[in-house]
Image (cartoon, rainbow, N blue to C red):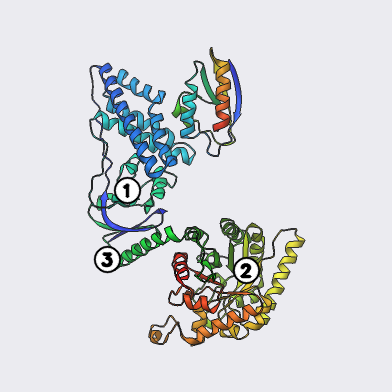
Amino acid sequence: MKNFDYTITDEVGIHARPAGLLVKEAKKYESKIVVKMGEKAAEATKLMALMGMGVKKGDTVTVEVDGADEDAAVDGIKAFLESNF
Amino acid sequence: MLKYSGKSVYKGVAMGKVLVFNKEEDVVKREKIEDTDAEIARLADAIVKSQKQLQDLYEKAVKEVGEASAAIFEVHQMMMEDEDYIEAIHNMIRSESINAEFAVATTGDNFSEMFAAMDDDYMKARSADVKDISNRIVRNLLGKEADDNNQSEPVIIVADDLSPSETVQMDKDKILAFATVHGSTNSHTAILARMMNIPALIGVPMNLSEIQSGMVAIVDGVKAEITFDPSSEECLSAMNRIKEQEVQAKLLETLKGKDNVTKSGRHINLYANIGSVSDVGYVLENDAGGVGLFRSEFLYLGREDFPTEEEQFQAYKQVAQTMAEKKVIIRTLDIGADKQVDYFEMGKEENPAMGYRAIRICLKQKDIFKTQLRALLRATIYGNISIMYPMITSVSEVEQIYEIVDEVKNELQSAGVAYKEPEQGIMIETPAAVMVSDELAKMVDFFSIGTNDLTQYTLAIDRQNEKLCDFYDSHHPAILKMIQMVVDNAHKEGKWAGICGELGADTELTETFVEMGLDELSVAPSMILKLRQIIREMD
C-alpha cells in the first residue's frame, strides 16, 4: 500500500464536476483508492461520498492506494489532483 | 393586490401572466413487489433513459447558456452513476422487496439531506441536484415524459423552488421572469437566470395557495418585489419601465465601448451618479467612464449613529477598486435640507434649504468631517478617487476645508498611513459660487455644477412646492448663462467643469452643453448610453 498527502489549492475545494472527473480517473485503476481527511474517508470512485467530505481550500487529504497497479495509480492520481484541485 | 419582497438575482422588470409551476408532486407510493430482479432491470432502463435525457439537456444548455453553466448536467450524469447511490437503491429493492420508484425517492431524500446538512453553501445547494436526479429517474420509471413547458404565451414562473433541469427545459422565449419561495443566490437556478438575463426573485415568502396561474403579476428585480393583481397605475409604470429597458438593451448592444465624441471630434466625459456601493454594477453595465457623483449620505442615513471611519473606508475602497483606474468622485457629507438624520441633532429650522447643511455642518463639527476625510484619504490608494465638497459659497470656505484636510494628512503621515493626493473639487450650486468662480477656479481641480440647488436658489423657487410648478423653468436663461460663466472661469485656470445635477441628463440640452464646452456630464447610469447616442449624432 502506498499513500501521499495533497493540499487543496482550488478556491471551492472538491466540488462537483472535478470530483466527477476524479472518479473517472480513479476507475482507470484496479487498486483501491481511498481519500482520507481526519476521521472522514471516501473511496475515490464514489462521487457523492467524496463531495460529502466537504473538503475545502487549504485542507490536506491523504490518498491511500492499495493494489496491483498502485505505482501507476499514485502517479496518475497525484498528477490529476495537481492539475485539477 | 398581493405584494411580496424577496432577493433579486437579476435586476430587471417584467409583467405578465403567472404560471404556478407545480413540481410534479411525484407522490411515490410504496408497493410490495415479487420479482426484485425484474424491478432492478426496470430501474436500469430508467437510468439509461435518464442519462440520455441529461445528455440532451447538456447539449441544449451548452448552446443556450454556455459550457460553464451546462456543466451541471454533466455533474447530474456523474451523480447518477454514483456507486453508493445506486447500491443503496438496489439494497432497498432487494431487502425490502419494494418498488424501484419508492427506493429511488427515499434514497434521493437521504442523500439530499446529507448535502443539506453540510456546513458549506456550495454543497448545501447540491441537495437540490440529488433531488433533481432522483425525480428524473422516478418520472422515467412511471413512464412520464420529462416536464415540458408547452405554454403558448410568455409567463412569469412562480414556484416553490426550481431545479436546474426544470429551468433549462423551459423555453426561454416563453419566460418573462422567475419568482421562487426557496433557492439560494448560489443555486444553479439563480446562476442560470442571470445568464439568461431574466428578472428573478428568490426567497419570496409567497403563499402559493393564494396564487393561481393566469393572474397578472409584475416582477421588479430592482426593488426585489413581486406584485400580483397590480393596480392599473402600477401596470402603466411597469410598462414604461419595460419599454425603457428594451430601448436600453438595444442601445447597450451598439454603443458599449464607444467614445462620447461628436462627428467633428469634440469629446465629453459621461460619468454616473450613484448613491450606494451596490450601484457600481449599473455604472459598469452602462459603460460609464467613471463615477461623477458618489453621494456619501447613504452611509449616514437610516441608522442610529455615525458610521465609523472603517465602515466608510471599506465602502469607498470597494467602489474605487471595482471601478479600477476610472475616476470616482466622492462628495462629502451632504446632510440637511431635505435629508435629515436624527442623531445629528440639528434641530428644526425655518428654512432648511438655506440652513445648517452640507459643508456648513462639516466646518462646524470638524470631528464628523475629519472622520470622513481620513476614510477617503486612506481609500485613495485603491483607485482613482477625487473628493468633492458641496454647498460652497466663498473662497474662505475652501481655505477652511484645506486647513482641515492638511490636518488630517499630517495625522495620517505621522501614523504612517499611506494615501495618494486626490483631486479636490467643489460643487457649484449657489449663485454666490458662480459669481466668484473665477477666484474658486484658482483653488480647486474641478467644478461640478449642482443644477437642482442652483436653480432653486437662483429662481427663488422651492421645487417641492406644487403651486410653483408653472414658474419653474429649468431651462431659464439665467441658469444657462451661469453654467457658461462657470465653464469659462474653469477653463481660464486650466481646470475642468461638469454638471452632476438632473439638468445634466436633460436630453434637450445635451447639444447645448457640448457647445458650451462642458467637459463632463454626470447622470444616472441608465442615461449614459442615451446621451452617448445624442453626442455621437452631433456635428
Question: Residue tagged by mark 1?
Answer: B172
Please name whichever residue, B80 or B335, is drawn nearer the observer in this view of the structure: B80
- Tell whether label 3 touches label 2 (CB within 8 Å): no
Under mark 1, the amino acid is Lys
Report the chain holding disc 3: B
Pick the residue in front: B127 or B80: B80
Please name the residue that numbered disc 3 is placed on: B231
Label 1: few (<14), some (14–19) or many (≥20) C-alpha neighbours in 10 Å: some
Q: Chain of mark 2?
A: B
Where does residue B15 sit, x and y in percent of width and height? 30, 59
In the image, residue B340 above or below residue B69: below
Query: On screen, B125 above or below B410?
Result: above
Residue position for label 2? B387
Name the residue nearer the viewer: B210 or B305: B210
Mark 2: which amino acid?
Ile
Residue at horizontal 58 percent and vertical 30 percent from the top: A82
Quarter of the picture holding the N terminus of chain B: bottom left
Q: Are labels 3 and 1 assigned to the same chain? A: yes
